[in-house]
Image (tube, coloured by chain):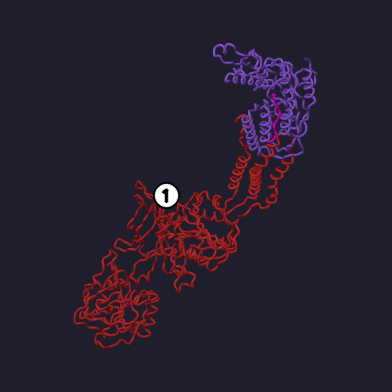
Amino acid sequence: MDFPPTRDFLDPTVLARLSGLPLVARGPMIGGVSGRHVSPHRGASVEFAEYRKYVPGDDLRRLDWRVLGRTDRYYVKEFEADTNLRLVVVVDTSGSMSFQDRITPNSLTKLDYAKRLAATISYLAVEQGDAVGISLVSNRVDRYLSAKRNPAHLQTIFELLGQASAQGETNLADCLHELSETIQRRAAVIVISDLFTNPESLKACFEHLRFRKHDVSIFHLLSPEEVEFPIESPTRFVDIEGNESVFAEPSEIASEYQRILNEYLQRLKQIALDTSVDYRKILINESYEKVIAQFLVERVQGLSQGRSSR
Amino acid sequence: MNLLQPWMLIALPLVLLPILIHLLNRRRFATRPWAAMMFLIEANQSARGHARLRRWLVLALRTAVVGALLFAATRPVATSVFGFQLSGTADTTILLVDRSPSMQQSVSPELTKLESVQIQMHDTFARSHSGKWVWIDCATPNAETFSGFDELLRAMPQGPLDASSNFPAMLKATSDYLHDNPSGSADVWLWSDLRESDWSSNEAEWSAVRESLKRIPRSVRFRLVSLLDKGALNEAVRVSDVRQERTNEGNFLVMTIHVSVNHSVESVKTLPLEIELSGNRFKSEVSLNRNEATLMNHRIPLASEVRGGWGRVSILADTNRADNEYFFVFKEPRPSKIMIVGNRNEVTEPLAIGCEISPDGMTKNEVQWVSSTDVRNISFGQLSLLIWTTELPDDEARKTLRQFLAQGGQVLFFPPDSLNAAESLQGTESFLGAKWNGWVSNDRRVMIEHWRGDQDLLAATSSGVGLPLEEIQVQGYAQLSGEVIPLATLSGGAPCLARLATDAGGVYFCTLSLSKEHSNLAENGVILYAILQRAIQQGREANRDVEYWTAGQSSLVQSLPWEKIAGRDNLLSNQFPFQSGVYREKNGTDFESEEATSGRLIAVNRPITEDQTEVVSNERIRELFDGLSFTQIDATETQASDLMQELWRILLIAMIIAMLLEAILSLPKTIVRQGEL
């Protein structure tokens, strides 16, 4: 597959290396076609699911004759149904995503990093036959493409990502609530954002998404400069998303800044645990390939552990 | 506190430099687009109070450092020791300086304690400003007031004295001055080496002085600069028992020389002596054993025609030159002259016998008999004792006797024969309020019941043995009336020996008759002889040819005029009583003449207590000043040459502390990084 040169968020070598890793859902998915994901419905796959008492109307072909012969009872043998995944990638395109780390040479902006994550995961999903949709949000849902599994749709997604730019204020909570209702069928929702909003409002969003049976994953993008706060000289900090500015002596507030940031991160982690959201804190100087690989591997491991425990 | 370079204060606006730099620095901020504003705003708000306090503290410390630097450049000085005790300038500064002989102890090869004090005083006060300067002199504790310190230095003698200081009296004078001039604050500076001889710390008057000082209605601060001994070896010489003896072997001057050392000497050490006698010098030596040496009855041959003179004994120079010499005077003893007024008979003859024999057994006193009518014509010169055995003197004789008493003369009255011849006879004359009132005869003998054995004519001997007055038996005695002080009383309370209170001289009345019929006073002899010889001795004291006086004795001050024969150079005559030396007293006839050669010789020497090195403890000193604003400064004599310290050391320390604090406050806080969570 050839990409226009402007699509620098796609690296073929990375795609090639990651293509061997499957993207699996943490829960049953409802897809339109057969796929590699577990469906909540029983199907005709080779994987046994359970025995169920025969009720009138059941297909007699599913009746387990051996059990009938041994026990003189009527049981129907059911098998798992495999279906495809509906993946929706939510990319935060608010102004804060244009932040570029200064302490890392040749650093990407958060949005660039988000584009790489979104494009790569979308490609992998389509490649394994899953449907992929995308939503660009800032203070509202700017763009939303419903999930489709044809490669042409992937082109549309890439074009959308290529055109995306960071601007406007963040209103992630409302956008996620809106998307919870917009995405009709259960899907894997990946939110890529810096999450600079009230954690409690995010908790409500996550609960809403989970209530809608979505498998929610959060890629929390942070800049090392934001985390370490290595600035020493007096600085006027100008809000990227607005005109507000704050004059501060970094040496005086660094400790307090660190404390508040840590509390915020701890709270986010706790909310993710409470709402069963797959939360991942990512520094944008990390390799996105490594981040995606770790994400995919852990999902596969999680699924196999879940099946074995079941 | 004063500034030596006050013009440097024009640079004072430079203290604003840190503030200016701070403001400029704040204007040179960088602008940074930031995404995580929600954390930044919250951190900025919560850290604002503490951070602002720290920022202002840092700014204040930087300003203080620059201020201290500028202040140090003005060279501030304060009346302090080693910069620890700062004070403002008092309205009145009172100076009390110990100039006693012990203050001439050397503290360095060049300086004595007193010279060190003078340098300290000059360095301390020459740059100080005070409304009034008061000098309490240790010689005569009077307060002298000056408007400037230089004026004080010019007017008041600062040199050493051979008299002990009397700090209770000096502080009493200080108290009196401050009570009389109750305005403003006062600083009282005392310089002393804390010798007990100068402080008399156990005297009862201290409590009265302290209470008086406490009642002063103004702020008074006492500062005692103590100059303690460094324990250097010091020897002191002293002479006693100086007398001229003319024997068959020749004419000799006999004296006892004492040398004391403030430290024990392990081995016997020979110390050379030099004796100067009327301009001639003799060498001698004395062997020191442990910490003293005595050369008993050292004889120096004199020419046969020498009948008196003066001299000095000196030892080699040591750490204190004030106790290296001792002056002496001597005069060939001459018989005392006693005059008995009355009839010479077998009753009164024991008086003459008792007077003629001197206690030393070598000289014979001269006794003269006169009648009462001849008294007005006789000369009392060199008369030691006048014994009156007739009726009390009439008006003219009384005038003569009063003159005799004024010169220190002694008069001893015995009851006249006429009194016991007619028992009812009443005495018609009186003397200074006392008179004979008749005669009392007893059938049985009466004993002397009480007598004053502690002093006066009936005092016990120097060995402590009392006179045997219990051996006296009385059958008749004269009645005495008037304001008399009984020295001995008979059973029943009648006085048998009494004295009158007089300003000078001595007047005694003996109510016992020498007749065997009335008492065994003459027959006993011992009591009568003791009374007569002690009265003669008291008379001789008033007529001595030579005197040994202690420097600073208050009575000496009124004994002027004197002429100096030997002693310190460049002395004013009013300083003679406070300086060791030999002086000649000008008598009335010589007073106006240019050459006075016939007056008494007086040797003035330091008090014996100055040879004792006992020092008042610091605890006792604090007790003496208990309840007062008092600071004791233990100045190291060789180093504390300047009590007015420049404060640069303090400012330097303050700057270092301020810079350290500034550095601590400016240290970046330890930040808990995300990765450390």
Chain B: drawing colour? red
Where, quadrant-wise, is the N terminus of chain B in this rendering? bottom right
For residue A188, above or below residue B404: above
**Residue at left 61%, top 16%?**
A76
- Toward the viewer: B567 or A173? A173
- Toward the viewer: B92 or A139? A139
Quadrant hosting residue B477? bottom left
For residue B105, above or below residue B409: above
Chain A: drawing colour? purple
Count of labels in the image = 1
| Place of residue B230 in the rendered image (x, y in percent of width and height, measured from the top left) | 45, 49
Does residue B557 appear to the left or right of B478 in the view shown? right
Q: Residue A123 magenta-drawn? A: no
Does residue B577 appear to the left or right of B336 in the view shown? right
Determine the chain carrying the residue at label 1: B
| Place of residue A157 in the rendered image (x, y in percent of width and height, measured from the top left) | 77, 22
**Residue at left 54%, top 52%?**
B81
Task: Return the residue at label 1.
Answer: B233
Q: Residue A189 magenta-drawn? A: yes
Residue B65 appears anywhere in the view: no
Disc 1, SS? loop
**Residue at left 54%, top 64%?**
B218
- Toward the viewer: B281 or A188? A188
Magenta residues span A186-198
Quadrant hosting residue B416? bottom left
For residue B675, above or below residue B340: above
Does residue B317 appear to the left or right of B342 in the view shown? right
| Place of residue B454 in the rendered image (x, y in percent of width and height, measured from the top left) | 31, 69
Tell me which amino acid carries mark 1.
Leu
